Amino acid sequence: DTEVTQTPKHLVMGMTNKKSLKCEQHMGHRAMYWYKQKAKKPPELMFVYSYEKLSINESVPSRFSPECPNSSLLNLHLHALQPEDSALYLCASSQGWTDSDTQYFGPGTRLTVL
Amino acid sequence: AQTVTQSQPEMSVQEAETVTLSCTYDTSESDYYLFWYKQPPSRQMILVIRQEAYKQQNATENRFSVNFQKAAKSFSLKISDSQLGDAAMYFCAYRSPYSGNTPLVFGKGTRLSVIA
């Protein structure tokens, strides 16, 4: 089973709203990732959570904040977003402890900021 | 820093025919992992095939196979007996091996159309 689930599938929010994206995996993976993907572009890494340690892409603005309540859940909290933040947000997970790690992706959340 | 280049923004293939997607990469590392991911219109990124650089044998998964040329830093994907469901964006990706949470470096992708 290589399933990563994400909710919601679609989200429309205003610039003053606060919302959260949720990602869950039950594969016992210890590393989880958030990627942002604009149309016709490859995914760009935003955050990595591995063994309770957070690694941040320094170009990601503070209006995005990840939270890892437990090893199978990774949330992405959104606050005061801008229209240019509209994109597909992909979550992925991997075992996190092997050299031959493979990342498995969820179906994504399509975010529109008005 | 590693880079991945996919020189074909778009490709098309007749149903049941064979197509090859190109990927080259640049790295100074001797050990690494290479991946092909498929992203259909449904948006989910699906792993197609994986290659470990220390393995000389080319990886295969059913109709999908790679031609891995380490010296040339080339990693092309061959799709045999193409099916309509193969239509998607294909991304080539590179990962360093040194810890389990190193990020994937993606190419810009190749959009594959399958013609009935």
Image (cartoon, coloured by chain):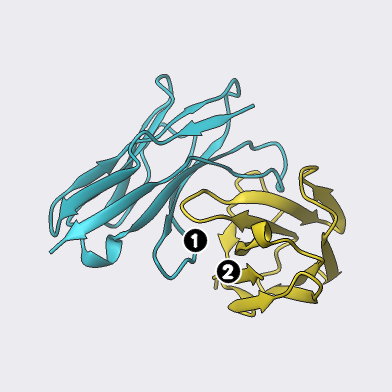
Chain colours: A yellow, B cyan
* Amino acid of disc 1: Met
Q: Position of residue A32 (x, y in %)?
A: 72, 60
Query: In this picture, is A10 found above or below B15?
Result: below
- Mark 2 Cα-neighbour bin, 10 Å: few <14, some 14–19, many ≥20: many
Q: Check chain identity for marks 2 and 1: say if they share one.
A: no
Location of residue A31 (image quadrant): bottom right
Quarter of the figure that contains the C terminus of chain B? bottom left
Q: SS of the residue at dot 2?
A: loop
Q: SS of the residue at dot 1?
A: loop
Quarter of the figure that contains the N terminus of chain B? top right
Q: Position of residue B114 (x, y in %)?
A: 21, 58
Indicate which disc residue B45 carries: 1
Q: Is residue B43 visible?
A: yes
The residue singled out by tag 2 in the image is A108
Evaluate if marks 2 and 1 touch, with contact meaning CB atoms under 8 Å apart: yes
Q: Give the residue displayed 55% in from the left and 30% down from the top.
A: B3
Q: Give the residue displayed 70% in from the left and 76% down from the top.
A: A13
Location of residue B99 (image quadrant): top right
Q: Position of residue B36 (x, y in %)?
A: 43, 48
- Mark 1 Cα-neighbour bin, 10 Å: few <14, some 14–19, many ≥20: many
Q: Nearer the viewer, residue A19 or A70?
A: A19
Indicate which disc residue B90 carries: none
Q: Is residue A92 visible?
A: no
Question: How many callouts does the rendering have?
Answer: 2
Q: Position of residue A106 (x, y in %)?
A: 58, 68
User: What subunit carries mark 1?
Assistant: B
Q: Give the residue displayed 57% in from the left and 61% down from the top.
A: A104
Query: In this picture, is A63 found above or below B95?
Result: below
* Amino acid of disc 2: Gly
Q: Nearer the viewer, mark 2 or mark 1?
A: 2
Direction from residue B13 to residue A61 in the image, left or right: right
